[in-house]
Structure formats: C-alpha cells, structure tokens
Amino acid sequence: MRFHVLACDFDETLVRRGRMADATLTALERLSRIGVRLVMVTGRRLDDLLEIFEHPRLFDLIVAENGAVLYDPGRRATENLAAPPPERLLERLRAEGVTPLAAGRVIVATEEPHDTKVLGAIRDLGLELQVSYNKGAVMVLPAGVTKASGLAAALKRLKVSPHNVVAVGDAENDHAFLSSAGCGAAVANALPALKDTADLRLAGKDGEGVVELAEMMIAGDLDALEIPRGYVLLGRREDGSEVRLPPYGTGAIVAGPSGSGKSTATTALLERLVECGHQCVVIDPEGDYSEFPGVTVLGDADRAPGVEEVLRLLESPDHSAVVNLIGMPLRDRPGFFTEVLPRIAALRARLGHPHWVVVDEAHHLMPADLPEIAVKQARDIGSLLMVTVHPEAVSPAALRLADTLIAVGDDSEATVAAFAQARGTREPSPASSGTGDLVVWRIGEDRTERVELVPGRAERTRHRRKYAAGTMSEDDSFYFTGPEERLRLRARNLHTFVELAEGVDEDTWLHHLRGGDYSRWIRDSLGDDDLAGDVADVEGSRDADAAGSRQRVVSLIERSYTLPAEPASYTPDDDE
C-alpha cells in the first residue's frame, strides 16, 4: 500500500453544511479497518468543532485552528503548536468594531471585508502574524502556521512520512496542505485554483468526493496514480528533456564494469531522493557509502550492525540509513540480508516507509543460485535499486523485480545483452541516436535510449575541487604558448592557470584572449558553460587591454571556484 494516511479538511469536504453523510462515515470506517490512519485538518476552533461534530474519535488526530492546535481524540489531549494571540490585537479589533470576532487557543477569526482592519492592526502593532483566507473567512495566525505545518506535527506523532499521505480539501487555505502531501486531491466543489494545482480532481462534491477517494484507496487504484511532481530525476536526453523514475513501485538495476560510474549514478539518485524527504536504506556490503551526506551509518570496520538496530532507526521517516557490512564476515552477509529484507518489508507495510531500498553488490547478496527472495514485487519495499557488476550473477528472482535497467560504462550494450539473457527477456535494439553516459532500458520496450546523467551535488563538488586544485590530464590542461609558440607553460588546473596568467607577458596573454582560447578551454575541458560564457564576453570586448582583461578573467574564476591559498601538490587524479 502506497498511502497510509488520509488527511481531510472539514467544512465542505467531509461535511455539507456541518453534517457528515452516513456514506462518508461508512467509507472512513472501512479505511480505518484496513489500517489507514485518519487525520482531520480544519480551520475551525477546536471547541467549536467538538460542539457540532459527533464522531471525533473516528480520527487518530485532529489538527484544528488552521494548523495551530493538535488534538488527540482518544486521550482527549490538546497541544498548542504556536503562541496564543496577543490581547492588544483583540482589544484593537474590538475597538474598531470588527464583528464577528472570535479567538481560539491560537487563532483569531473574522470575515471579509474586515481583513483590511486586521492587516492595519498587525502593521501598526508590529506583530509577526499572517492572514489566511477560507471562502470569505479571515484567519489570523503566527507566521509560518498553516494546515501544512499542523499536518507535519500530526505525522511526526504517527511516525508517517508526508509521501504516504493523501490530503483532500476545497478552499484557499488548503493549497499548502495538499502540496505537502504525497497526493493532493480536490473535491468537485473546490475552488478552481485549488483544482488546478491538485494531483487528483474528484468527481463527487464534499463527502461524496471523500467516499470516492476512500474507495480508490481500498481498491488500490490510488497506488498506480502518476504524480509527476514526485518523480526523481535521473538525467537528460540529447534534446534536453528529462528522464525521471517513479517514486513508488520502481525496480531498477544499475549495472556496469568496475570503475564505470555505477556509484556516481547511484549517489546522484540517492542524493535527490534524500533531499525530497524520501527515506532510503542502503545495504552496503563493502563500506562504499559510509561517507554519504545526510544519512546515518550503522556499522563500521570494527562492528557489524544488527537487524533490530536497523529497524529502530527506520521507525522514524526522518532518518535514512546506510547499513555498512564491512565488519561482517563475507559468508555472513547474504544471510543478514535475507533476514533484514522481510523485516523492512513488514515495517513498510505498517508505516509506509522506507521508500527506497538500495542493494549494493547485489550479485553477492542475491546470487544467481538463490531461487527466491523475500519480496515478490518492488512495491513491497516501496522501490528497489540494485547495483551490480554482473547482472547475470544476480538471482533471477531479483532480476524479475526490475522494470528499468541503467547500464553504465563504455560497453553498455553488452551489459544490456547480459541482463536480457539472464532474465530470459528479448534483447532490445540499441538506441538509434543520442549521446550520454547512460543507456536506459525500460524493460518491455523495444529500444534503449541514451541519457546524460545529471550528477549529484557531491559529485559536482568533487569535480569543482579537481578543476580548482587537482591534476588534469595533459590533453585537458591549458598551455600558454604565445603567438610564436615559444612557450609551453602547462596549467594543470585553475589554480596554476591563475598563477601563470598573472606572470605571462602581455603579448602571450592577449594572443590567447583574442583567439578565444580561455573560454574554449573552460567549456571543453571543464564543462562549465556558464563561466565560459562570462569569459567569452571579456574576450569579445574590443577595448580590452592586457591588465584589465587579465583581472576580469581571474575574478570570474575566483568567483566560481574556491582556489587554495598555496599551490597544490600534484598527484594523479583517480579518473586518469
């Protein structure tokens, strides 16, 4: 199951003119019985809501006052999520004749057109408050308090990720609420602006729309809903269009020879997934991901992680994990994986996370001789990414979980052929055109396509460091030769380029400047089109003299790259 929480607005969504229909109540009860948690998110004051609503205990939690109050109906416990309204604001509004005027635990509520008086009072009193609207209602709250912030507090209590939430509403104050959830739905009576931004437009009005949504969740129809805003970027085609992977139910294999770039592609995907709030768990047999930023590493060379330790960490969707098995004997690693995988699947069934399981060295943990694995489809653990040198050495049961092959390296087509043969699938035709460092095959399609990987931030940082102070190859280095090629001064990186640029004679500097050599080197060898364009502007200036142009080029480089204070010691780069 993809979605584990249904979060509902109250007025004109769950109820019509304050009354919930019996069919809506029945649909919510059915959802609750299959394990879906129910959260109400309303702009109403809590006391007002409890006076008119007969079924508060149907909900696991209620977020009231437009995100400012959290109520647990089972324990009848209330928590204010922000400070109460200042009395001087209420005194000012009463003095100005603002009516109706109601104050809750945190919220101050009135109606249009009194919003002009409210805004004036906030300005004059110097208060850090915001105004929200709901079909004519005017709500005053502390800055940053919205239905989305209130839902986030409720989800933290439930240990559920926003990616596993369906939110449904109808009005202006539901925009942030819907966009913060994995799926945002609008009932048929919703405002047009909300429908335009919703992931799903329901045919039914208010409670009828909620019944429609509940039936989709029960039938599993919502699991297959395509929500493009949640797709994870892999790379770009030659025409610039993006290639993305669905965030749920994906089974992907990254395959290629050692040193071909598998870890580069994998870490780029991981980085973007973690940045978007997906919980990822990497099973890392050889400690290759022990320095991955933003995740908790369990285990090291001296201590193997335990299964219970892994599960305890994953209970909270806020923590992604690298399970480092380097301290575990080689023969014990497949057994550990066989034990932990079904436990992860059980956690996923209960809470909806983790969202992605990454299995490095998949041919070791799921060898070809293994007849079965603990999951029958990738969605049992959210999404699955397997990384291997030899796809033919991976269990056929694991290969059957894959719907996408990402082949890396110079002989990517051979990797595709080896995978197709191991899986018993007809080999696709090679891409008819295109450039790129990846070959992507959507299994079942007749042809592969070439894709240029969009590297992760960590990889971009590594390359920037390399260009600034590392040692570039002889072919990629810049050579100051001068107009008569009397010189051959090699700039192995940007640091030495700047040092040499400041020391060469004016004729040599201007020779390369007027030939466009600096921007050409930066574009072709560094791959930095933005910097190359700025330097080309300097080269194209007709009145550029040696001193001024030299200073401008050096300043542009220093603005884009952090250069070391002292010359770097030159050592061969790993990529050479």
Image: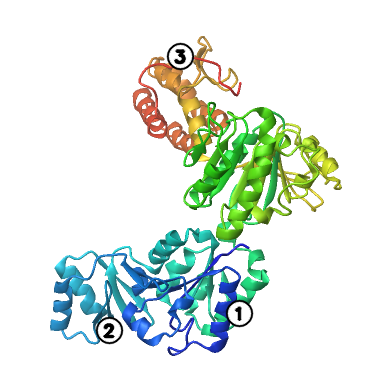
Say few, some or many: other residues with alpha carbon within 10 Å of mark 3 (under 14 / 14 to 19 / 20 or more): few
Q: In this view, does 163 lie above or below 8?
A: above
Label 3 vs 1, first from the N-terminus: 1
Amino acid type, label 3: Ser
Assign the N terminus to one quadrant of the image: bottom right
Amino acid type, label 1: Glu
Discs 2, 3 touching: Cβ within 8 Å = no
Taking the image as shown, residue 436 lies to the left or right of residue 24, namely: right
Which residue, as the protein is rendered here, is positioned at the far top? Answer: 486
Label 2 vs 3, first from the N-terminus: 2
> Colour mode?
rainbow
The one of 244 and 215 positioned closer to us in this rendering: 215
Q: For the residues marked 3 and 1, what is the alpha-carbon distance in whole angstroms?
A: 67 Å
Q: Position of residue 529 (x, y in %)?
A: 52, 37
Q: For the residues marked 2 and 3, what is the alpha-carbon distance in whole angstroms?
A: 70 Å
Assign the C terminus to one quadrant of the image: top right
Say few, some or many: other residues with alpha carbon within 10 Å of mark 1 (under 14 / 14 to 19 / 20 or more): some
Q: Position of residue 59 (x, y in %)?
A: 47, 74
Residue 448 seen anywhere in this rendered image of the structure: no
Q: Residue 569 carries which label?
A: 3
Residue at 53 percent of width and 52 percent of height: 278
The one of 479 and 39 positioned closer to us in this rendering: 39
The residue that label 2 is drawn on is 113
Q: For the residues marked 2 and 1, what is the alpha-carbon distance in whole angstroms?
A: 36 Å
Taking the image as shown, residue 44 lies to the left or right of residue 231, namely: left
